[in-house]
Image: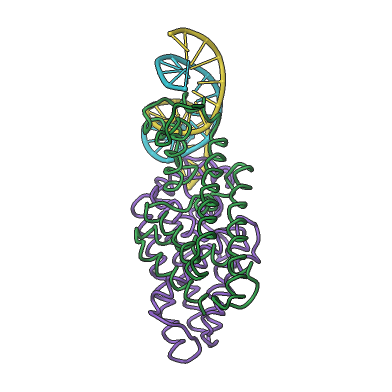
Chain colours: A green, B purple, C yellow, D cyan
Amino acid sequence: MASTRTKKESTTPERILDSAERLVQTRGFNNFSYADIASELGMTKASLHYHFSGKAELGYALISRYSERFSVALSRIEQDSSPVGEKLEAYANLYGDVLRGKRMCMCGILAAEYPTLPKPMRDAVRRFFDENQRWLAELLTQGRADRALAFEGDPSEVAQGIVSTLEGAMLVARSYGDVARFNTTARQLLTSLAG
Amino acid sequence: MASTRTKKESTTPERILDSAERLVQTRGFNNFSYADIASELGMTKASLHYHFSGKAELGYALISRYSERFSVALSRIEQDSSPVGEKLEAYANLYGDVLRGKRMCMCGILAAEYPTLPKPMRDAVRRFFDENQRWLAELLTQGRADRALAFEGDPSEVAQGIVSTLEGAMLVARSYGDVARFNTTARQLLTSLAG
DNA sequence: GTCTATAGGCAGATAGAC
DNA sequence: GTCTATCTGCCTATAGAC
């Protein structure tokens, strides 16, 4: 065996990312510190710097991992055999699942702090939105051709609207600690696309 | 005259609020300091504390003033004689105007920082959303009765969706520095309600 | 009302021992 | 890889002179 680690265990960098991820998604990037992560993991701030040289690098790594996971989830939805309407619902549920964990979408909360972020993080946030919109636009195009969806205008622009609506619904719903609020808006959105 | 000030001038507390308002709406509440305001106004941090005892009080005053201004704007829309569809468009333009000034909605950005805010600020953010939803629900109810609007379901829930969508559209559009992105989503939203 | 001066704390980051 | 110790800087806030 090349490695003695089993899949269940996680490396120190992974545990750091897990902790930081939760903190970012609840408080925002500028509202947590190395000290927060260190105390949660029972290690020192200096040790964290060994794995992630600075907060900017940690932040970039966080978005990268989050985006990759999201990509995987999109591929799964794409590959399953359900109709387009259900795929769209599964997409909205990705957001709902995050909110159920009392978290904001990482890139949604980072968008709120956008002007204060280091450039590499800003670019990574945009790429996240871009990829979601591209994926959705393709789904919408296909759904309209199949008569499974009915909407007017450019699929790419409608895709933008979907991302914006879901991000906004999470943002507001979290202030009320009320996942039902998100679901209501998500359902309205999906219904309006089903024609 | 009871006061020698003309309407054009502004008091020191007002100038402090103006500066802090811009900072909150661009960077967020936790990402600006008394030092930022002081340097912008050419005064010291200590002087700011004379007018607003702490950052929590300043933050509360910011939301109060912002909410009151928004209420006035809503009343103006309500009282003008245009049809319901145009009133809805005027409502969306309130958000668009903020974004054109390269700012986020104050309560939208505060919603992203929600768990880190002092309790009085959290409550004030919710009241802002509540008031907007109440006002919109009434407009929607009237618009549907007049056959000027066509939508299904509870007007109050649709109102929730409108607020969420506009907040999300601002959030994402600002990351791209692209007001057109907001307009596209806002127009889709209005179109879907016009039937 | 505004200032100087400063307290006290926490941030991100580094040096160097183990 | 992880630690202790420390640096520097910024934060909110206060005391007290003018």
Q: Is residue B12 visible?
A: no
- Compared with B83, A26 (above or below) is above
Could you tell me which residue is drawn at 62 percent across and 60 percent down? Answer: A134
Q: Is residue A109 left or right of residue A158?
A: left
Q: Residue furthest front?
A: A1
Q: Name the quadrant containing residue C18.
A: top left
- Residue B151's x, y, as percent? 46, 83
- Residue closer to the observer: B60 or A26: A26
Q: How many numbered callouts?
A: 0
Q: Is residue A16 left or right of residue A78?
A: left
- Residue A110's x, y, as percent? 53, 49
Could you tell me which residue is drawn at 46 percent across and 24 percent down? Answer: A47
Q: Name the quadrant containing residue B159.
A: bottom left
- Residue A82's x, y, as percent? 48, 66
- Residue A165's x, y, as percent? 51, 65
Q: Name the quadrant containing residue A34.
A: top left
Q: Is residue B47 left or right of residue B96?
A: left
- Residue closer to the observer: A128 or B14: A128
Could you tell me which residue is drawn at 37 percent across and 31 percent down? Answer: A39
Q: Is residue B57 visible?
A: yes
- Compared with A108, A65 (above or below) is above
- Residue closer to the observer: A27 or B127: A27
